């Protein structure tokens, strides 16, 4: 990328440490002649001197967006920026942070590298989900389950017009490689390098032991059809958006043409996973 002129900031506003770091970053960027905008939600709590910088995330027109929070904050931000392909630099202010790039104490070291153009942009695959004519995208996963605990979904799964399984299970996860270290991993799915061009299908506590996690080519078309009359379910997309699903509904999932973009300073996927899984 060229010289960075405009930076947006999205931050969690329920922690004073996040709010304080946001103020410090704004001052640093202003001192380096960078135009700054901030999410209007944090603009309401950060202090009156910075309120004028507030804009909706969807209206940010920045070269880079700095995201201060955990994976949930990153997913929310990426969802809002989905079609703009603005690279996100993530600062970990969450619990685990598989998607985050730097820790708070290293912020200004790496901001210096950012302004010196000493970084690269990594693209992460997303999946498009179509249901009832509505199209949404997911960076991590779509999770399908019933609203009632201990009730199972009953679905037919097809890949490129071939039925691969009919399952009864507590739920179903369809995940990108980025999402392989999230809910999918907890449900017994494999960890997949984000460079692998694939989609994961992971049943949650299936009734049949033969219903196992499956990895399919990313250019496949997946159709999930709901085949149990009287059963209602819902789909949660990246932990944020929610879709209600009824009998005979179907969802179509394909690789998105719009990847998510992240600012990276080093290639360390495996060491990062090892660190996150063995800490705490």
Image (cartoon, rainbow, N blue to C red):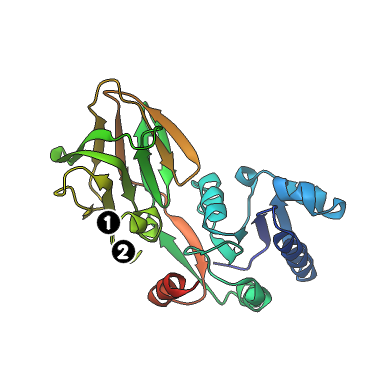
> Where is residue 280 drawn, in percent x and y?
50, 71
Q: Nearer the viewer, residue 234 or 223?
A: 234
The CA span between labels 2 and 1 is: 9 Å
Q: Position of residue 18 (x, y in %)?
A: 70, 61
SS label for mark 2? loop
Task: Give residue 183's position: percent from left, percent from top.
Answer: 39, 53
Q: Which residue is mark 2?
A: 192
Which label was assigned to residue 128?
Answer: none
Q: Is residue 132 above or below residue 266?
A: above
Residue at left 73%, top 58%?
36
Q: Residues within 10 Å of mark 2 (few under 14, many from 20)?
A: some
* SS under mark 1: strand
Quick one: label 1, few (<14), some, or many (20+) residues within 10 Å? some
Left or right relative to 224: residue 16: right
Q: Are marks 2 and 1 in contact (CB under 8 Å)?
A: yes
Which residue occupies the extreme right position in the image?
49
Q: Count the labels in the image.
A: 2
Residue 198 shows which numbered tag? 1
Q: Nearer the viewer, residue 114 or 224?
A: 224
């Amino acid at each position: 990328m060229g010289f960075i002129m405009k930076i947006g900031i999205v931050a969690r506003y329920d922690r004073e440490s996040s709010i304080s770091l946001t103020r410090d970053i704004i001052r640093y960027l202003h001192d380096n002649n960078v135009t700054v905008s901030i999410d209007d939600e944090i603009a309401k709590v950060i202090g009156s001197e910075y309120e004028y910088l507030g804009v909706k995330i969807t209206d940010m027109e920045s070269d880079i967006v700095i995201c201060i929070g955990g994976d949930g904050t990153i997913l929310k931000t990426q969802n809002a920026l989905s079609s703009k392909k603005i690279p996100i630099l993530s600062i970990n202010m969450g619990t685990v942070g598989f998607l985050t790039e730097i820790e708070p104490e290293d912020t200004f070291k790496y901001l210096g590298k950012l302004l010196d153009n000493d970084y690269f942009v990594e693209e992460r695959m997303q999946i498009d989900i179509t249901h009832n004519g509505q199209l949404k995208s997911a960076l991590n996963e779509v999770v399908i389950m019933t609203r009632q605990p201990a009730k199972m979904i009953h679905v037919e799964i097809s890949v490129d017009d071939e039925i691969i399984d009919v399952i009864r299970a507590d739920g179903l996860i369809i995940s990108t490689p980025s999402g392989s270290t999230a809910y999918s991993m907890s449900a017994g799915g494999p960890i997949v390098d984000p460079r692998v061009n694939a989609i994961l299908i992971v049943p949650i506590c299936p009734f049949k032991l033969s219903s196992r996690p499956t990895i399919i080519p990313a250019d496949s078309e997946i159709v999930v059809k709901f085949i149990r009359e009287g059963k209602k379910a819902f789909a949660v997309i990246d932990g944020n958006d929610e879709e209600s699903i009824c009998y005979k509904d179907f969802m179509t999932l394909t690789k998105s043409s719009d990847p998510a973009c992240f600012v990276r300073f080093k290639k360390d996927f495996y060491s990062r996973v090892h660190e996150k899984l063995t800490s705490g």
